[in-house]
Image (spheres, rainbow, N blue to C red):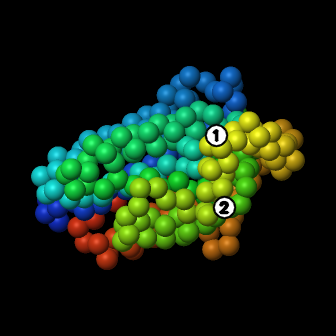
Amino acid sequence: DRFIRLAKERYGRIDVLINNAGYGMRATVEETPVDDFQGMLQVNLMGTFHGIQAVLPIMKQQKSGHIINVSSVGGKRAMPQSGAYSATKFAVNGLSEALRVELKAYGIRVSTVMPASTATEFFAVAGKKTGKPAKPAGPLQSSETVARAIRSCIEHPRSEVLPLRATRLLVIANAVMPGLLDRLVRRYMTMHCSPLSPGKSIPVPRASGASLRGGQFCIHLLQYAQEFPATTFGIGIEG
Protein backbone atom coordinates (compact mmCIF):
# COMPACT_ATOMS: atom_id res chain seq x y z
CA ASP A 1 0.00 0.00 0.00
CA ARG A 2 2.80 2.41 0.85
CA PHE A 3 4.50 1.80 -2.50
CA ILE A 4 1.27 2.57 -4.35
CA ARG A 5 0.59 5.64 -2.21
CA LEU A 6 4.06 7.08 -2.78
CA ALA A 7 3.77 6.56 -6.54
CA LYS A 8 0.43 8.37 -6.56
CA GLU A 9 1.85 11.25 -4.53
CA ARG A 10 4.82 11.62 -6.84
CA TYR A 11 3.13 11.27 -10.24
CA GLY A 12 -0.45 12.25 -9.46
CA ARG A 13 -1.81 9.08 -11.07
CA ILE A 14 -0.99 5.42 -11.73
CA ASP A 15 -1.37 4.12 -15.27
CA VAL A 16 0.17 0.66 -15.03
CA LEU A 17 0.68 -1.88 -12.26
CA ILE A 18 2.83 -4.96 -12.95
CA ASN A 19 2.58 -7.85 -10.52
CA ASN A 20 5.69 -9.95 -11.05
CA ALA A 21 6.64 -11.53 -7.71
CA GLY A 22 6.77 -15.32 -7.60
CA TYR A 23 8.82 -18.45 -7.00
CA GLY A 24 8.47 -22.20 -7.47
CA MET A 25 9.50 -25.53 -6.02
CA ARG A 26 10.49 -28.82 -7.65
CA ALA A 27 8.45 -31.52 -5.91
CA THR A 28 5.51 -33.79 -6.56
CA VAL A 29 2.20 -32.80 -5.01
CA GLU A 30 2.66 -35.54 -2.41
CA GLU A 31 6.16 -34.35 -1.49
CA THR A 32 5.25 -30.66 -1.21
CA PRO A 33 5.22 -29.50 2.44
CA VAL A 34 2.09 -27.59 3.42
CA ASP A 35 4.14 -24.64 4.69
CA ASP A 36 5.99 -24.35 1.38
CA PHE A 37 2.76 -24.44 -0.59
CA GLN A 38 1.29 -21.75 1.65
CA GLY A 39 4.42 -19.67 1.12
CA MET A 40 4.01 -19.88 -2.66
CA LEU A 41 0.35 -18.95 -2.34
CA GLN A 42 1.24 -15.91 -0.25
CA VAL A 43 3.81 -14.63 -2.73
CA ASN A 44 2.50 -15.77 -6.11
CA LEU A 45 -1.22 -15.26 -5.55
CA MET A 46 -1.80 -13.08 -2.50
CA GLY A 47 1.01 -10.71 -3.49
CA THR A 48 -0.81 -10.13 -6.77
CA PHE A 49 -4.15 -9.84 -4.96
CA HIS A 50 -2.87 -7.22 -2.50
CA GLY A 51 -1.28 -5.17 -5.29
CA ILE A 52 -4.54 -5.14 -7.22
CA GLN A 53 -6.64 -4.13 -4.23
CA ALA A 54 -4.22 -1.33 -3.36
CA VAL A 55 -4.28 0.24 -6.82
CA LEU A 56 -7.94 -0.19 -7.78
CA PRO A 57 -9.36 2.81 -5.86
CA ILE A 58 -6.89 5.07 -7.68
CA MET A 59 -7.54 3.62 -11.12
CA LYS A 60 -11.30 3.69 -10.60
CA GLN A 61 -11.15 7.32 -9.58
CA GLN A 62 -9.15 8.27 -12.68
CA LYS A 63 -11.33 5.95 -14.83
CA SER A 64 -8.31 4.39 -16.51
CA GLY A 65 -5.39 2.09 -15.86
CA HIS A 66 -3.75 -1.17 -16.84
CA ILE A 67 -3.04 -4.12 -14.54
CA ILE A 68 -0.53 -6.65 -15.86
CA ASN A 69 -0.23 -9.90 -13.94
CA VAL A 70 2.85 -11.98 -14.76
CA SER A 71 1.71 -15.59 -14.55
CA SER A 72 3.24 -18.54 -16.40
CA VAL A 73 2.41 -20.94 -19.20
CA GLY A 74 2.39 -23.35 -16.25
CA GLY A 75 -0.88 -21.66 -15.34
CA LYS A 76 -2.36 -23.07 -18.55
CA ARG A 77 -0.71 -26.49 -18.51
CA ALA A 78 0.91 -27.94 -15.39
CA MET A 79 4.06 -30.01 -15.56
CA PRO A 80 5.10 -32.91 -13.31
CA GLN A 81 6.86 -31.91 -10.08
CA SER A 82 5.58 -28.34 -10.32
CA GLY A 83 1.96 -28.90 -9.32
CA ALA A 84 1.95 -26.49 -6.38
CA TYR A 85 3.58 -23.73 -8.40
CA SER A 86 1.21 -24.27 -11.32
CA ALA A 87 -1.77 -24.17 -8.95
CA THR A 88 -0.78 -20.66 -7.86
CA LYS A 89 -0.44 -19.56 -11.48
CA PHE A 90 -3.78 -21.10 -12.47
CA ALA A 91 -5.24 -19.00 -9.64
CA VAL A 92 -3.57 -15.84 -10.98
CA ASN A 93 -5.04 -16.56 -14.42
CA GLY A 94 -8.51 -17.03 -12.92
CA LEU A 95 -8.20 -13.82 -10.93
CA SER A 96 -7.18 -11.95 -14.09
CA GLU A 97 -10.07 -13.35 -16.14
CA ALA A 98 -12.62 -12.23 -13.56
CA LEU A 99 -11.00 -8.80 -13.25
CA ARG A 100 -11.07 -8.20 -17.01
CA VAL A 101 -14.85 -8.30 -16.96
CA GLU A 102 -15.34 -6.59 -13.60
CA LEU A 103 -13.20 -3.57 -14.53
CA LYS A 104 -14.15 -3.04 -18.16
CA ALA A 105 -16.85 -0.51 -17.25
CA TYR A 106 -14.23 1.56 -15.41
CA GLY A 107 -11.88 1.77 -18.39
CA ILE A 108 -9.28 -0.40 -16.64
CA ARG A 109 -7.51 -3.04 -18.69
CA VAL A 110 -6.24 -6.34 -17.29
CA SER A 111 -3.59 -8.45 -19.02
CA THR A 112 -1.96 -11.76 -18.14
CA VAL A 113 1.60 -12.39 -19.34
CA MET A 114 2.53 -16.08 -19.35
CA PRO A 115 6.24 -16.72 -19.94
CA ALA A 116 7.65 -20.16 -20.63
CA SER A 117 10.90 -21.31 -19.00
CA THR A 118 13.06 -18.23 -18.58
CA ALA A 119 16.83 -18.09 -18.02
CA THR A 120 16.97 -16.91 -14.41
CA GLU A 121 17.85 -18.13 -10.93
CA PHE A 122 14.30 -19.54 -10.73
CA PHE A 123 15.39 -23.14 -11.38
CA ALA A 124 18.16 -23.14 -8.79
CA VAL A 125 15.70 -21.89 -6.17
CA ALA A 126 13.00 -24.33 -7.26
CA GLY A 127 15.21 -27.35 -6.58
CA LYS A 128 16.96 -26.05 -3.49
CA LYS A 129 14.64 -27.28 -0.72
CA THR A 130 14.09 -30.78 -2.02
CA GLY A 131 17.56 -31.27 -3.48
CA LYS A 132 16.00 -32.17 -6.83
CA PRO A 133 17.76 -30.20 -9.56
CA ALA A 134 15.16 -28.28 -11.54
CA LYS A 135 15.62 -28.07 -15.29
CA PRO A 136 13.55 -26.08 -17.79
CA ALA A 137 10.92 -27.99 -19.74
CA GLY A 138 11.09 -27.03 -23.38
CA PRO A 139 12.74 -24.01 -25.04
CA LEU A 140 14.43 -21.44 -22.82
CA GLN A 141 13.74 -17.75 -23.33
CA SER A 142 15.71 -14.77 -22.05
CA SER A 143 14.42 -12.31 -19.48
CA GLU A 144 14.78 -9.57 -22.10
CA THR A 145 12.24 -11.40 -24.25
CA VAL A 146 9.73 -11.32 -21.41
CA ALA A 147 10.46 -7.66 -20.64
CA ARG A 148 9.89 -6.73 -24.30
CA ALA A 149 6.59 -8.65 -24.29
CA ILE A 150 5.45 -6.68 -21.24
CA ARG A 151 6.45 -3.39 -22.84
CA SER A 152 4.53 -4.34 -25.99
CA CYS A 153 1.51 -5.18 -23.85
CA ILE A 154 1.65 -1.73 -22.26
CA GLU A 155 1.77 -0.06 -25.66
CA HIS A 156 -0.77 -2.40 -27.28
CA PRO A 157 -2.90 -3.98 -24.51
CA ARG A 158 -4.01 -7.58 -24.93
CA SER A 159 -5.90 -9.90 -22.61
CA GLU A 160 -3.28 -12.65 -22.67
CA VAL A 161 0.34 -12.64 -23.80
CA LEU A 162 2.49 -15.72 -24.44
CA PRO A 163 6.01 -14.35 -25.10
CA LEU A 164 7.18 -17.68 -26.57
CA ARG A 165 4.98 -18.38 -29.59
CA ALA A 166 5.51 -22.13 -29.48
CA THR A 167 3.64 -22.30 -26.18
CA ARG A 168 0.43 -21.27 -27.93
CA LEU A 169 0.37 -24.73 -29.51
CA LEU A 170 0.81 -26.26 -26.05
CA VAL A 171 -2.18 -24.34 -24.72
CA ILE A 172 -4.36 -25.32 -27.69
CA ALA A 173 -3.29 -28.97 -27.52
CA ASN A 174 -4.05 -29.12 -23.82
CA ALA A 175 -7.56 -27.78 -24.41
CA VAL A 176 -8.31 -30.11 -27.33
CA MET A 177 -6.55 -33.36 -26.37
CA PRO A 178 -5.33 -33.29 -22.75
CA GLY A 179 -4.97 -37.08 -22.51
CA LEU A 180 -2.60 -37.27 -25.47
CA LEU A 181 -0.63 -34.32 -24.12
CA ASP A 182 -0.29 -36.12 -20.76
CA ARG A 183 1.47 -38.98 -22.52
CA LEU A 184 3.70 -36.67 -24.55
CA VAL A 185 4.66 -34.64 -21.47
CA ARG A 186 5.52 -37.78 -19.53
CA ARG A 187 7.72 -39.04 -22.35
CA TYR A 188 9.43 -35.66 -22.77
CA MET A 189 10.09 -35.25 -19.05
CA THR A 190 11.52 -38.77 -18.83
CA MET A 191 13.88 -38.19 -21.75
CA HIS A 192 15.00 -34.62 -21.12
CA CYS A 193 14.35 -33.67 -17.50
CA SER A 194 15.40 -36.69 -15.46
CA PRO A 195 16.89 -35.74 -12.07
CA LEU A 196 20.66 -35.55 -11.67
CA SER A 197 22.44 -37.71 -9.14
CA PRO A 198 22.08 -36.56 -5.51
CA GLY A 199 24.76 -34.17 -4.41
CA LYS A 200 25.38 -32.64 -7.82
CA SER A 201 25.12 -28.90 -8.11
CA ILE A 202 21.91 -27.40 -9.44
CA PRO A 203 22.53 -25.73 -12.79
CA VAL A 204 21.27 -22.22 -13.51
CA PRO A 205 20.08 -22.25 -17.14
CA ARG A 206 21.13 -19.53 -19.52
CA ALA A 207 19.79 -18.29 -22.80
CA SER A 208 21.48 -16.04 -25.31
CA GLY A 209 21.59 -12.54 -23.89
CA ALA A 210 19.78 -13.64 -20.74
CA SER A 211 19.93 -11.96 -17.36
CA LEU A 212 18.56 -12.70 -13.92
CA ARG A 213 14.86 -12.07 -13.67
CA GLY A 214 14.99 -10.80 -10.11
CA GLY A 215 17.74 -8.31 -10.97
CA GLN A 216 18.29 -7.09 -14.48
CA PHE A 217 14.78 -8.07 -15.59
CA CYS A 218 13.48 -5.40 -13.22
CA ILE A 219 16.05 -2.97 -14.61
CA HIS A 220 14.71 -3.56 -18.14
CA LEU A 221 11.22 -2.63 -16.92
CA LEU A 222 12.47 0.44 -15.10
CA GLN A 223 14.22 1.59 -18.26
CA TYR A 224 10.94 1.23 -20.14
CA ALA A 225 9.19 3.10 -17.31
CA GLN A 226 11.06 6.25 -18.30
CA GLU A 227 8.86 6.33 -21.38
CA PHE A 228 5.74 6.01 -19.21
CA PRO A 229 6.32 8.55 -16.39
CA ALA A 230 3.02 7.86 -14.62
CA THR A 231 3.57 4.14 -14.57
CA THR A 232 3.99 2.11 -11.40
CA PHE A 233 5.89 -1.15 -11.68
CA GLY A 234 5.06 -3.60 -8.93
CA ILE A 235 8.42 -5.33 -9.02
CA GLY A 236 9.09 -8.60 -7.25
CA ILE A 237 11.81 -11.18 -7.51
CA GLU A 238 10.87 -14.44 -9.17
CA GLY A 239 13.10 -16.95 -7.51
From the top left corner, tell me how far across and down residue 121 is, in percent. Answer: 61, 54
Question: x, y (%) of residue 108?
Answer: 25, 55
Query: Callout 2: helix, strand or loop?
Result: helix
Nearer to me, 213 or 171 = 171
Residue positioned most to the bottom:
227
What residue sits 49% from the left and 59% below the top? 161
Q: Which residue is mark 2?
A: 166
Spatial CA distance of label 2 from label 1 is: 16 Å
Outermost front residue:
176
Above or below, 95 relative to 8: above
The x, y position of residue 163, in whole percent, is 55, 63
Q: Is residue 13 left or right of residue 119?
A: left
* x 39%, y 45%: residue: 96
Q: Position of residue 207 (x, y in %)?
A: 68, 67
Which residue is label 1 attached to?
78
The image quadrant where one finds the N terminus is: top left
Specify the amino acid type for callout 2.
Answer: Ala
Confirm whether residue 47 shows in the render: no
Q: Within 10 angstroms of label 1, few (less than 14), some, or many (20 or more) residues? A: many
Residue 188 relative to residue 58: left or right: right
Instruction: Write the residue at 84% across / 43% down.
Output: 187
Q: How many marks?
A: 2
Tell me which label, 2 or 1, sits earlier in the chain.
1
Report the amino acid beneath label 1. Ala
Residue 21 in view: yes
Residue 55, numbered circle: none
Give the SS element for disc 1. Answer: loop
